[in-house]
Image (spheres, rainbow, N blue to C red):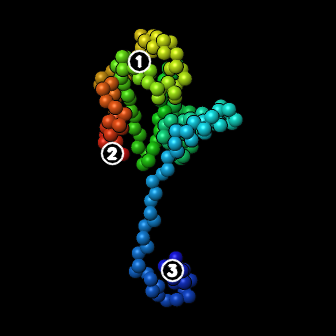
Amino acid sequence: MRVAVFRFFTQRNYISDNPLGLIKTPAAARRSPRCISQNEKNALLKEMRYRRGAREYAIVLTFLRLGLRVHELCDLQLRDLMLSEKKGTAYISGKGDKYRELELEADLEERIERNKTPHRLEHKPTKRDITFSEQDLKQTMEQHRLNSLEGEIIKENYLRINNTKINAREVAEIIKNRFDL
């Protein structure tokens, strides 16, 4: 505060020299962003879905699921989305305008097992009918190719991970290291 006052006085020619001019002001402490809990996310989504409408729900869902910064969400354009009946891809230009594309894949048996976990059943209502979910996954895999072929996509900021035998924490570490996050 004092440094700013003396700088102001010097700029307005009230004083000739700033006695504190050589003192460097300390950098502001950076806080880690606070993450909201799963219960807070669920409450927010419920509020958006039932009281605000489809548009607001879609905005908040996109924001939360993709882990976007506010400016990334605001900059998102329709042309940045590639949507099909079974999956979608959002191309987000993030910090430093770096584009990154990530493809996760897992074997059919692993996908079926993951669809039965309590977490998946809690957060994905369409998976709760386990028999239907399993049949739908098998049918989808027969009719559509859900992942790229090995070597099919050659891009600098593209990463393909087969996460059949590795956990989410290991996948996150691979992504962090590959994209220097």
71 shown above or below 45? below
Q: Which residue is mark 1?
A: 112
Give the alpha-carbon distance from disc 2 to disc 3, as whole Å: 40 Å
Q: Work out which quarter of the rendered image holds the C terminus and state it.
A: top left
Categorize mark 1 by other alpha carbons within 10 Å: few (<14), some (14-19), many (20+).
Answer: some
* Circle nearer the viewer, 2 or 1: 1
Q: Nearer the viewer, residue 137 or 87?
A: 137
Relative horizontal placement of residue 72, taking residue 57 as reference (left or right): left
Q: Is residue 140 visible?
A: no
9 shown above or below 173? below
Relative horizontal placement of residue 158, taking residue 1 as reference (left or right): left
Please give the label number shown on residue 3: none
The answer to which of marks 3 and 1 sits earlier in the sequence is 3
Q: Which residue is mark 3?
A: 2
Q: Which residue is mark 2?
A: 180
The residue at the point 39 percent across, 20 percent down is 113
The residue at the point 51 percent across, 80 percent down is 2
Q: Position of residue 36 (x, y in %)?
A: 52, 45
Categorize mark 3 by other alpha carbons within 10 Å: few (<14), some (14-19), many (20+).
Answer: few
The answer to which of marks 2 and 1 sits earlier in the sequence is 1
The residue at the point 60 percent across, 36 percent down is 45
